Image (cartoon, helix red, strand yellow):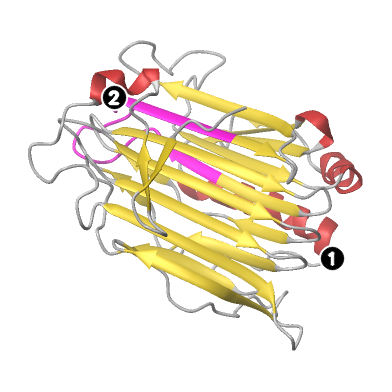
Amino acid sequence: MGFDYQLNQTTASVPEVDFSHCAEMAPYLEVPKAMYVGAPGKHGYLRMGFEIDPRGKCIMRDLERRVPIIVQQELYFDEEMPEMPCVYILSSGGQYMEGDRYQQDISLKEGAFAFVSTGAATKIAEMTSNYCGLVQNIVLEKDCYLEMLPEPVYPCRHARFISDTRIVCHSSATLVYSEIYMAGRKYYGDGELYQFDIMSICAHGERPDGTPLFREKYVIEPSLMSPRQLGVMDGYDVFGNVIVMTPPDKAKEIYEATKAFIDPDKKLAAGITHLPEGSGLLYKVLGMESGPVKKLIREFCSSVRMAVKGHPIPEEFPWR
């Protein structure tokens, strides 16, 4: 199980992200006519490290960022777990553009816990050349707990996006990692549903010693095969995917408390399955609008927190 990207160390702390060897991106390697790939402001980098300080408080000990990524100090607003640091990842550059490259490295030292999200939805702009790419490395040591629940991703017409998420998780740690992908800008003009060029999404997990656990990758190219078919998206417009890596006893408790269903009236569907090697669970949601999908995912993540930490996730802020 290798990475889906290549790292060429350009400085001591900011690697170059390159997906050009991925077969599905071969048609999109044209150099942008405006700012070149990885130009200043187009190569964002973030490193965050959480640990327990001598007072027993979990803090963000390590932080390095490069524009356009913005992260400020951690906040402690979770009423159910007021000791948990909450961090929002922001972008001064707005939407993802052609030639943009991003990398986010998030690590938790033994016993640490945190909540990470984005400040707003991520829009992937219309593109005429090249693509945008995101690499994420998430590392959890012994007895760690991380909730990473970013806002939805909106691909515009002719958007081209590829991501690779590598998860290194100790067998005693728990990670809740969600992704929500829209079919496009549903209410923009006549709509842009499934008019993007390509969305290539990969996530893979392993133990600290390198033992591979699972790998999930999907490549969506609507011009080659429409997602509007049974067994793919059918009539749904929103896809939610939640990876839960947790010890087997916790996974069993969460699995038994979660029901798979199809609700034709609410136009929602959800299903759950086990990840290989006893590494956790995979929960998927389909819907027509982002709000109900987000709500269902949040309720599921709350059941995970109850099983692992004994506390629910509070109600979402009304403005989120």
Q: Residue at x 27, y 64 (%)?
A: 92
4, above or below 15, in the image: above
Q: Does the magenta segment cover residue 181?
A: yes
Residue 150 at x, y percent in the picture:
50, 54
2 vs 180, nearest the viewer: 2
Q: Which residues are magenta?
A: 179-203
Disc 2 residue type (three-letter): Asp
The residue to which callout 1 is attached is 310
Q: Which quadrant of the structure image shows residue 90?
A: bottom left
301, above or below 62, in the image: above
6, above or below 198, in the image: below
Quadrant of the snapshot with the N terminus: top right
Disc 2 versus disc 1: distance between alpha carbons?
43 Å
267, above or below 42, in the image: above
Sequence order check, earlier mark of 2 and 1: 2
Asked whether residue 225 appears in the rendered view, the answer is yes
The residue to which callout 2 is attached is 197
Image depth: mark 2 or mark 1 in front: 2
Looking at the image, the residue that sits furthest to the bottom is 55
Looking at the image, the residue that sits furthest to the left is 33
* Magenta span: chief secondary structure: loop
